[in-house]
Amino acid sequence: MSTFAEIDLKDIRTDCRFYTGYKPCHKNDGCPGCTHFAPRGVQILIIKLGAMGDVLRTKAILPALKRRFPESWIVWITAPGSESLVRDPMVDEIHALGPEGLLALEGRPFHSVYCLDKDRHAMALSAKLDAGRRLGFAPTAYNTATVWNDASMYALRLGLSDELKFFQNQKTVPQIVAEMCELDYQGEAYGLQIGAAARFEAAQIWARLFAEHGGAQPAGAKVVGLNTGCGPVFATKAWPVERMADFVASEAARGDRVFVLLGGKREEAIHRRLMEAAGPLAGSRVIDAGTGNSLEVFFGLVERCDAVLSADSLGMHVAIALARPVVVWFGPTCHAEVDVFGRGEKIVTDFPCSPCYLKECPKPVFCLDAMSIDSVRGALDRALA
C-alpha cells in the first residue's frame, strides 16, 4: 500500500470531507484507492445572524436542503454567541460574523448562498461572495432590503404590510424560509445539540438544586420549567410578574409539580419576586435554577423539565427543539409564525390591537395582563398529560 511519503500532491483527495491537511483522518493509510472517500459536493452557505430564536428555528430547513443537495458541504455564518444554536450533524462548518469568520469565506466558490436576514451586514456579505446563485434577501444600492429571487418576495412583503404579517399570514417561519430557499419543506422540527460538558454541568446543577431542598425530585411530581425572560427588544411579550407570581404560588401549592425558574441576568429581580410569592414553598416546590448559567447549560436545564412555560422567546424555541411539551403565550407577536409541532399549546390573547410588535404598550391594561391564570393552568395540565 502507498504511504504519504510516496504519493504526489495530485493523489491527495483534498475534496474529501474527511480531509483537513492538518492531521490524519485515520480512515486509511493513504488517499489513493481509499474506500472511505466521501466527496464534499457542492459548497452551500447559509447567512443567518439573529435573533437567536430565529437562528434556531431556521435549522428546520436543513433536512430539505440535504434532500435537494445530498452531496453538499453546508457552511453557516451567524452572530457571535449563536454558534451553539447552529451545531448540527448536517452543518459542516460554523463561523461567527467577524474578521476571522469573513476570512474563512473569502475567495471560496459557493454553489449557493442563502441570505436569510435583512441585516445590512448579512445582505452586504451575500453580494460580496463568489456564488453560483444567491437566494433570500439582497441589498439595494442604499443597503436596504430587496430580494435575490422571486420566491423571497413573500418574506419581503411581510415586512412591508402589517395587515399581511399580523392578520393574513398563516405560514410558519420555517415554511417562509424554505420558500425563500426554494426547498421542499415537509414540516420537520428543528433540533438542538448539547455538548457533553454542558449536559454534565446541567446535571450537576440539577442534582444540587434538589439536594439543597430535601433530596431528590419528589416522587410522582412533574417538573415545570418557567422561562421567565423574553429578551430586551419586546419586553411586552412577558407575562406581568405579578400575574406570574400569583400563578406560581397557586400551582406550587397543588403538590404534584415543582417549578424551576429559568432565566438570565436580566431576570434576577423577577426570580426574587417569584420566590417571595412562593412563600414557604420556595426552595422545595419553586426552585431558582440561577441566572448566571451559560447558554448551553441553560439548554441542559430545559432538557430536564417535563414541560416548559414561556413567552415567545429563545427559551420557547429551545424547549421546542428539545421536544419538551411547551405552553407559550402570545400577545404583541404573531402566533401563526410559530410551530410547536404538536408538542404543546399556544395561548393567544384576543385583544383587537394585538399583535402590534410595540416595545412599550401605551394602554393602561395590555394584552398579557388579561391572560387568565385558568387558561395557563388548563394548557399546562394538558401538556403534562
Image: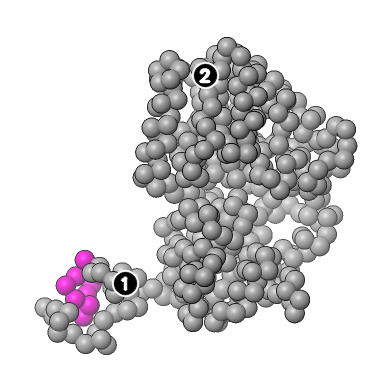
Percent x, y for residue 22?
28, 71
Q: Secondary structure at mark 2?
A: loop
Q: Residues within 10 Å of mark 1 (few under 14, many from 20)?
A: few
Q: Secondary structure at mark 1?
A: loop
Could you say which disc has been placed on residue 20 in the image? Answer: 1
Q: Give the answer, above or below, for where 364 lies relative to 217.
A: below
> Which comes before the other along the chain, label 1 or label 2?
1
User: Where the C terminus falls, by quadrant?
Assistant: top right
Percent x, y for residue 77?
53, 65
Whether residue 378 sits left or right of residue 61 in the image: it is right
User: Where the N terminus falls, by quadrant?
Assistant: bottom left
**Magenta stretch?**
26-36
Answer with the quarter of the image where residue 139 lies: bottom right
Residue under pointer 2: 283
Percent x, y for residue 250?
65, 16
Whether residue 251 sits left or right of residue 145 in the image: it is left
- Observer-nearest residue: 217 or 272? 272
